[in-house]
Structure formats: C-alpha cells, structure tokens
Amino acid sequence: MSTFLLLGLSPFSWLGGSLVSFALVFLLALGGKRFFPDRFDGVRAELVRSPVHALVRGFFITTAALGSIVLLVITVVGIPFAFALGCALSIASYVGLAVACSLLGAALPIESLRGNETKQLAAGTLAVFVLVQVPLLGPLLGATLAMAGIGGLRVTHAAAPAAGHPYRDRA
C-alpha cells in the first residue's frame, strides 16, 4: 500500500484496472457467443473434454510465442512482427480467459443461472475476478485459465470443418 502512496496513486487504483480488464473479458465473451457461437461452443467442449491437454497445449503455445517474440526483437527487422505476435497472443489469452469464465459460470451450482447464458457468463466472470485477486495464487490461476483457453482455441482452429456449413466445406 505504501508503494501506491509513493507513486501518488490511490490504494484502490488497482481495482479500477482490474474491473476494466474483466469488463473487457465479459464483453469479449458476450461478443464471441453472439458472433461466433460454433467456435465458442467448440472451445468450451474441448475444455470440458480434455482440460489438461488444452492446458499443456496452451503452455507450449504461449512459451513458443514468447520465445519467438524475444528472437524477433533481437533481430531489429523483426520488431513489427514481434509486436503483431504480442498483440495476437494477448487477444488469444483474453479470448481463452473469456471461454474459461463462461465455462466456470455454467458449472456454478446456482439455480437462477440455469438456462441463461448471459447470467452464467457474468457469474463466471465475477468468480474469476474475485479469485484472481488472491495475492499469490490469483495471477497463477488467471494465467492457467488463459493458457487452457489458448490450447482449446488451437484445437478448434485445427479441427476439420463441420459438416452442413457451406462456408466451411472444402472443395
């Protein structure tokens, strides 16, 4: 708390940044459910089917992306590509966290949430927001959920196109 006072910040200024971050996660998940329902549900199904595999894949993808960013920054010519890769990694981690929040909200044993996906998403986002505030384990939990979501995104991206969708069928 003294660090906040030394910097001239309010002791609760971190709360505003966290709220904005989780509001972004909620809106991203809401938009994903609205505009990409098949992909969103596919990632959720993958996280339910094999959460450990998705977490391991997400860990390796994140590690490889961070290593690639370092190598691209070392070669001065690759700095724009490193920036683009960093943006893609942060967007993928937010989408993965949004899918994990949605899945957690659906798993909560609250009767009033049954059948309403928006309420489930809000409850899951609130639960993750509260859990991430725990001093030592919170950031680890947030990173774990984001990496599991990234792993699920990768599996659904590499999956074969679904039958019955003409824009996905291969010629």
Image (tube, helix red, strand yellow):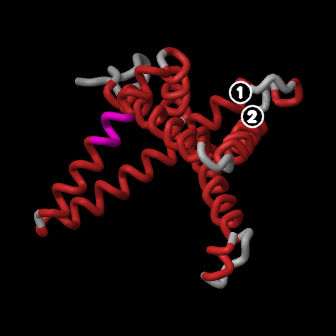
Estimate the spatial distance between the alpha carbons at disc 2 and disc 1, rounded to whole Å.
5 Å
Q: Is residue 91 magenta?
A: no
Residue pictured at 23% horizontal, 24% vertical = 171
Residue 106 is marked as 1
Across and down, in percent, residue 105 comes to 71, 32
Q: Amino acid at mark 1?
A: Ala
> Does 127 sit above or below residue 169?
below
| Mark 1 residue crowding within 10 angstroms, few (<14) / some (14–19) / many (20+) | many
Residue pictured at 88% horizontal, 29% vertical = 112
Say whether residue 20 is left or right of residue 38: right
Mark toward the start of the polypeptide (2 vs 1):
1
Q: Which residue is mark 2?
A: 120
Residue 135 is marked as none
> Does 15 sit above or below residue 149?
below
Dividing the picture into quadrants, the one containing residue 24 is: bottom right
Q: Is residue 129 visible?
A: yes
Residues at badges 2 and 1 in contact (C-beta under 8 Å)? yes
Q: Amino acid at mark 2?
A: Gln
Q: Nearer the viewer, residue 122 or 138?
A: 138
Dividing the picture into quadrants, the one containing residue 19 is: bottom right
Across and down, in percent, residue 161 comes to 35, 23
Label 2 secondary element: helix
